[in-house]
Amino acid sequence: MFHHHLLGVERYGQKIAVEIKSFLGLSLISDFHEAMGQAWNYKVVLEEIEPNRVLYLAVPEDVYEDFFTRRLAKISVGRMQLNLLVFNPIREEIIIWT
C-alpha cells in the first residue's frame, strides 16, 4: 500500500499537477503498477478538464534509484509520456524534474 496526493500548483508560470507517491507497500512492482494506472487516469482527466496543466508523478529518491532506473520503468514512463519529480523526503527537497 502506498500513500498519494494530487496537488495543483504553478512552476515558472506553467500550470502543473503533482501526484505524490510514497511507495510504502511490500512490492515495488505492485506499487508501480498502481501508480502508473492512477497517473494514467489523472492524465486522461486533466487532458479533458485542464489540457494546459502538465502532470508530474513525484516519487521518493530511494524508490527512483532502486526502481525507476530499471528498463521496464524507463520504457513505461517514456511511452506514457509521464513527467517525473524525484524528491528527498528527509531533506524535503526536489532532486530531479524530468
Image: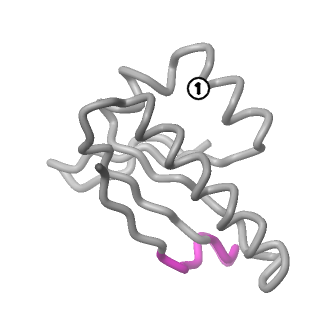
In which quadrant will I find the C terminus?
top right
The colour scheme applied to this rendered structure is one colour
Q: Which residue is nearer to you in this view: 31 or 18?
A: 31
Instruction: Give the farthest residue toward the bottom.
Output: 49
- The image shows residue 55 at horizontal and vertical percentages of 65, 62
At x 63%, y 71%, the residue is: 16
Taking the magenta stretch, the answer to whether it contains residue 17 is: no
Residue 97 is left or right of residue 21, and the answer is right
Residue 84 % position (x, y): 56, 45
Please provide percent x and percent y for residue 68: 50, 27
Q: Is residue 52 above or below residue 67?
A: below
Residue 66 percent across, percent down from the top left: 36, 20
Return the residue nearer the eye: 42 or 57.
Answer: 42
7 up-or-down from 80: above or below: below
Could you tell me how many numbered marks the image carries?
A: 1
- The kind of residue on which mark 1 rests is Ala
Residue at horizontal 35 percent and vertical 32 percent from the top: 63
Q: In which quarter of the image is residue 42?
A: bottom right
Q: Vertical placement of 38 versus 76: above or below?
A: below
Name the residue at the top extreme: 71
Q: Is residue 89 above or below residue 32?
A: below
**Does the magenta run of residues contain 8?**
yes
Mark 1 crowd level (few <14, some 14–19, many ≥20, 10 Å Cα): some
| Magenta range | 7-16
Farthest-out residue, left: 90
Q: Main secondary structure of the magenta part?
A: strand
> Residue drawn at (81%, 76%), measured in percent from left and top?
52
Task: Say left or right for 65 vs 90.
Answer: right
Q: What element carries label 1?
A: helix
Residue located beneath label 1 in the image: 73
- Does 29 sit left or right of 46 as displayed? left
